[in-house]
Image (cartoon, grey):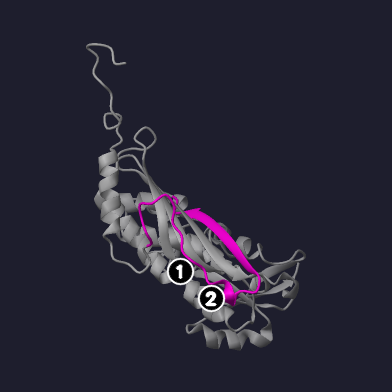
Amino acid sequence: MLEPGRTPSTYAQAGVSVTRGDAFVDRIKKLRSVSLGRIGGFAGGHEIDLAAYRRPVLLSATDGVGTKLLVARELGKYDTVGIDLVAMCVNDLIVCGAKPISFLDYIACGRLNPDVLEDVVKGILTGCEQAGCRLDGGETAELPDMYGPDDIDLAGFCTGIVDADRMLPRTSEIVSGTVVLGAASSGIHSNGFSLARKVIEHTPDYLSTLLTPTRIYVSLLTRLLETGKILAAAHITGGGLYANTARVVPERLRLQLDGEWPVPSIFPAIQEAGHIPDEEMANVFNMGIGLAIFVDPRDAETARAAAGEQLYSIGRIIDG
């Protein structure tokens, strides 16, 4: 019972507006997208046709965008970070052979700004369209005691499906002499931002380049998987080419880089501004290759023909 003379406390006075949150959900419901599922219920989902799968396996991936969001905040530009969020999740699925089918998002903020968050969700929908999956729901949390009024954080969760017999990597078939092809990145993607921001902070031209969205490789790798010739694939994120290819290379083997490919100008700019050694650059950034593809040397041309874009010969697997 409320004591006489005391002012009642409300959720809004604590900094959380349920009304503002409900209004934001209503705005999202009005967005037009083939990738938007039913929003606002307790759970999201859709039917899956299992007839095409002999032994269907569901795979799940989760990731975030990290401090790339601080660049978005500095520039007041949030329309592409949702693409990054989807890319970081679906790329991890497709390199395992799984077709992304369902995406969920979690958005945390200090104060719910409907214009900013609508831009974020529009980017998520764009990413889902590029990946061929659906946004089946999400959670928006207004947390004024944990975040500043202009702070946001993002997390994504994606589910994909693959037949057990078609999962990657096919580790036993990766041997010394296996060829490694690379697909170009769109830039820095969503890794290494703590270092990149430190060395080129407050440089508008570079900051805008840093916001170039992470490339989504689902359509490319789907074409390659249809050939049946792909032994493994690696999404090149934090740790660069060596660390990420090591995830799929058997013990006692290693990647030898001996190829050439275009390196986006943002990387030399970061290296020069921060006086960063070559080895450190290679261990932090993708350096222009966002996807590594492993094939038998006899199947390299088949993969190139199926790709529909240039694949670079970046190296091969050797004993090590």
Instruction: Of the two numbered discs 1 and 2 on the same chain, state the one appearing first in sequence.
Output: 1
- Identify the amino acid type marked 1: Ile
State the extent of the magenta-drawn residues as a range: 37-66
Visible in this render: residue 75?
A: no
**Does the CB distance between marks 1 and 2 fall below 8 Å?**
no
Q: Which mark is residue 216?
A: 1
Tell whether 183 sits left or right of 85.
right
Q: Residues within 10 Å of mark 1 (few under 14, many from 20)?
A: many
Task: Check the picture and name the quadrant holding the N terminus.
Answer: top left
- Identify the amino acid type marked 2: Leu
SS under mark 1? loop
- Looking at the image, residue 86 lies above or below residue 51: above
Visible in this render: residue 150?
A: yes
* Distance from Cα at disc 1 to Cα at disc 2: 10 Å
Camera-side residue: 36 or 76? 36
SS under mark 2? helix
Camera-side residue: 308 or 207? 308
Q: Which mark is residue 221?
A: 2
Camera-side residue: 147 or 256? 147
Residue 236 point in image, percent of width and height: 55, 64
- Looking at the image, residue 277 lies above or below residue 52: above
